[in-house]
């Protein structure tokens, strides 16, 4: 029997069994990471440097890009390291840091996605009150509330999870440190308290999803009243991909955490975790910004300015 005080490292689930597949996974993760870094980096640079983009929509988009960068940098670099060097270990403190950052960024992501839907809802249904409801101070307060609540929620999860005694070894059935996998190693009934926190988090996430769906229903109803087909196309081409990624993000996360044990398997858990932890940060820049003509113009001006300096 071992407890948490004697555990110095955890064993993560390998992405592949053979060396060739490990190197293939490394290359795939490297490509996705570079795409996420490039896309989100362009968003941050363009919004920070482009004064005409200092609007609520782009302000929240900048916050979302920061969240996506932190999200993918929390899990992917360690997975790439393990695939490249054919290892599966992570230190106890490294695992705790990964749990904290993962919960922090995923919570901030949910909050920011909900706020962005509120921004679009107000811009369509209450355009005359847009400046009042989404002024600079209100936007700063909403963003600060999203980050602060995510920090507190992640701190509670991490402190509670790593205070549990662990007596079922140190092997985790996931390629990164995930709370449900750590709870499986616990031999204490106090893990029910952590399960309660997870239920609260899932409920809040589902509430965000319901709000997003409700907002888009109202947005679509307003868009359908637009007589111009060009206006329809512009609105639907922006909203539908956003809603699709949010649905993928939430549905895979919910299914990963709430699926019955009878259908659970390491390969299924691995596939689901990749879908909600690796794919969205790389797709979000494409969906939220590259389809926006104003943002694309700002990116071209930024790139042209860099080329002229060189």
Image (spheres, rainbow, N blue to C red):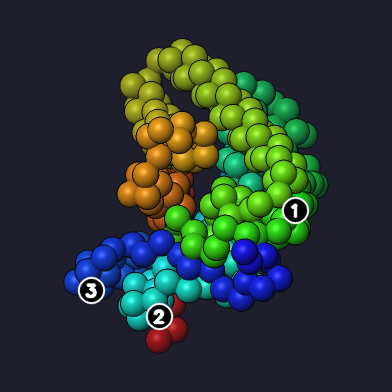
Give residue 112's position: percent from left, percent from top. 62, 44
| Mark 2 touches mark 1? (CB < 8 Å) | no
- Residue under numbered circle 1: 160
Q: Quadrant of the C terminus?
A: bottom left
What is the spatial separation of the Cα atoms under label 1 and label 3, in whole angstroms?
A: 37 Å
Where, by quadrant of the figure, is residue 48 drawn? bottom right
Q: Is residue 115 visible?
A: no
User: In the drawing, what numbered circle is on residue 308?
Assistant: 2
- Residue under numbered circle 3: 19
Q: Residue at x 37, y 44 (%)?
A: 265
- First in sequence: mark 1 vs mark 3: 3
Give residue 120's position: percent from left, percent from top. 58, 32
Q: What is the number of callouts on the image?
A: 3
- First in sequence: mark 3 vs mark 2: 3
Furthest residue to the left?
20
In terms of depth relative to the viewer, which is nearer, 63 or 110? Answer: 110
Query: How packed is label 2: few (under 14 Cα within 10 Å), some, or many (20 or more)?
Result: few
Vertical relation: 206 (above or below) 24:
above
Furthest residue to the front?
1
Q: Quadrant of the N terminus?
A: bottom right
Where, by quadrant of the figure, is residue 178 drawn? bottom right
Q: Is residue 129 left or right of residue 203?
A: right
The secondary structure type at the circle numbered 1 is helix
Give residue 9's position: percent from left, percent from top. 57, 73
Q: Residue at x 26, y 65 (%)?
A: 17
Q: Residue at x 63, y 66 (%)?
A: 2
Furthest residue to the bottom?
310
Give residue 160's position: percent from left, percent from top. 75, 53
Q: Residue at x 49, y 14 (%)?
A: 221
What is the spatial separation of the Cα atoms under label 3 and label 2, in whole angstroms?
A: 45 Å
């Amino acid at each position: 029997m071992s407890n948490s005080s004697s555990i110095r490292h955890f064993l993560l689930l390998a992405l592949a069994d053979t060396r060739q597949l490990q190197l293939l996974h490394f290359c795939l993760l490297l490509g996705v990471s570079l795409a996420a870094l490039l896309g989100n980096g362009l968003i941050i640079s363009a919004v920070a440097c482009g004064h005409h983009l200092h609007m609520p929509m782009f302000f929240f988009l900048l916050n979302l890009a920061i969240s996506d960068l932190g999200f993918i940098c929390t899990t992917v670099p360690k997975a790439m390291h393990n695939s490249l060097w054919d290892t599966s270990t992570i230190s106890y403190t490294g695992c705790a840091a990964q749990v904290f950052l993962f919960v922090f960024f995923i919570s901030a992501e949910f909050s920011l996605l909900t706020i962005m839907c509120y921004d679009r809802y107000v811009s369509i249904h209450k355009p005359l009150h847009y400046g009042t409801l989404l002024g600079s101070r209100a936007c700063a307060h909403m963003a600060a509330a999203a980050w602060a609540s995510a920090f507190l929620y992640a701190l509670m999860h991490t402190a509670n999870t790593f205070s549990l005694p662990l007596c079922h070894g140190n092997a985790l059935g996931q390629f990164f440190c995930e709370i449900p996998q750590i709870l499986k190693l616990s031999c204490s009934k106090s893990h029910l308290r952590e399960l309660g926190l997870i239920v609260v988090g899932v409920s809040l996430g589902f509430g965000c999803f319901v709000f997003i769906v409700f907002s888009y229903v109202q947005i679509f109803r307003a868009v359908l009243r637009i007589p111009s087909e060009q206006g329809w196309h512009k609105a639907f081409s922006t909203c539908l991909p956003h809603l699709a990624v949010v649905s993928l993000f939430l549905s895979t996360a919910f299914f990963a955490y709430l699926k019955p044990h009878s259908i659970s398997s390491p390969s299924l858990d691995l596939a689901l975790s990749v879908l909600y932890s690796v794919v969205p940060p790389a797709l979000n820049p494409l969906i939220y910004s590259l389809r926006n003509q104003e943002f694309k113009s700002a990116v071209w001006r930024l790139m042209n300015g860099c080329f002229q300096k060189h």
